[in-house]
Image (spheres, grey):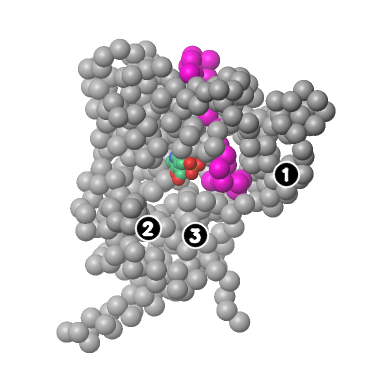
Amino acid sequence: MTDSPVYLDHNATSPIRPEAAAAVTAALRVTGNPSSVHGFGRAARRLIEEAREQVAALVGARPDQVVFTSGGTEANNLALRGCGRRNILVSAGEHPSVLHACEYARTAALESNGVVRLDMLRELLLAGDGPALVSVMHANNETGVIQPVEEVVALARSCDALVHCDAVQAAGKLPLSFAELDVDLMSLSAHKIGGPQGVGALIVGDRAELDPVSRGGGQERRRRAGTENVAAIAGFGAAARVVRDGPSGMGELAELRDALEAGLASLEPAVEVFGAGAMRLPNTSCIALPDSRAETLVMALDLDGIAVGAGAACSSGKVEPSHVLTAMGVLSEQAAAAIRISLGWTSTRGDVERLLDALERTLRRRGAARMSAA
Ligand code: PLP
């Protein structure tokens, strides 16, 4: 009997939760355009409004602040392009959907532990032309490093700037309150919390005046035109409810992550854990083994039935070193070795043990190959 596959790539997509899958399936059977006034339309509208309440409740926002989008990427684009400000400051570790949302954005560098340089953010704010929007993510998708959002907000407020926070990776992994964080815009994505892919939300606070980027329809209070993806939104709502009402499981995940990193260090004392000097999400380890290539390791683990992420981005067939690690000052050779192990609601101690066993075999094979080549 072969072992079942081990999935350790939750930061890419977390497996759909049964409650979310059931909500999607049920909603697909509901006929009706949520903008129609007849009974069919009203039934579809009810599904959306229920999900809006569930998503709002997950992140401590009001339902009327939730704008459903096609995912985190669109939410980020809408925030940066729709906020009506041209003085945009972002951190160098942001997701590409923030970094590339507008070509006029200016970038604050990262410390070597992955945290945004607040001194540089301050300089950029003071040197800027016109009212600014600062976009700093809550937690990084590659390293799990948590950003000092409260300090960013305090800094931004002292300069009359708005704050956008990409909380796609923080939602469900950290206590998250839009009201308490006091940011103006916040992005979420369903598939990172066990909902379906292709749906997300931008939370819009009272200070922000959002201009729609997609136009030609009055949906989402005129903030995002286009018929809503009712089934996906229903699934998002169900996932949000489960995450909010269920046990957080994050203490257990932090224990598993620590066991994983301790196991790695005993297999290979020279293992590098990126961002280890900063506060990190409890589920994420971005690591590099010496003299290794991420693609080779990811493929070797895949052959062993274990899915992990590569720390490098593969665009147009060319593997580029991660911009996040590069911004942390990691040398390109080490960045090219980075793999990301991200745990989640399906992860078990057995998964971590399988990964460590597979890595041990890989390291042993590599050692043997080197001996015979010498
Ligand atoms: N922001 C962060 C931090 C992410 O990790 C991701 C996805 O990996 C996104 C935004 C984009 O979200 P989506 O896949 O829903 O477009």
Asked whether residue 23 is in view, the answer is: no
Asked whether residue 318 is in view, the answer is: yes
Find the distance from the CA under tag 2 to the CA under tag 3.
Answer: 11 Å
What's under tag 1, amino acid-wise? Leu
Does the Cβ of the disc 1 residue fall within 8 Å of ligand 1?
Answer: no
Say which label, 1 or 2, has the lower sequence index: 1
Asked if residue 202 lies in the magenta stretch, the reply is yes
Towards the viewer: 200 or 213: 213
What's under tag 3, amino acid-wise? Leu
Tell me if residue 225 comes above or below residue 345 in the rendering.
above
Find the distance from the CA under tag 1 to the CA under tag 3.
Answer: 29 Å
Residue 8's label in the rendered image is: 3
Q: Position of residue 267 (x, y in %)?
A: 35, 70
Q: Position of residue 260 (x, y in %)?
A: 44, 62
Residue wearing tag 1: 28
* Residue span colored magenta: 190-211
Contact? badges 1 and 2 (CB < 8 Å): no
Tell me if residue 282 comes above or below residue 120 in the rendering.
below
Towards the viewer: 165 or 268: 165
Disc 3 crowd rating (10 Å Cα; few below 14, some 14-19, many 20+) is: many
Kindly give the residue lying farthest to the front in the view shown.
Answer: 216
Residue at horizontal 48 percent and vertical 18 percent from the top: 211
Nearer mark to the viewer, of 1 and 2? 1
Residue wearing tag 2: 310
Kindly give the residue lying farthest to the bottom in the view shown.
Answer: 372
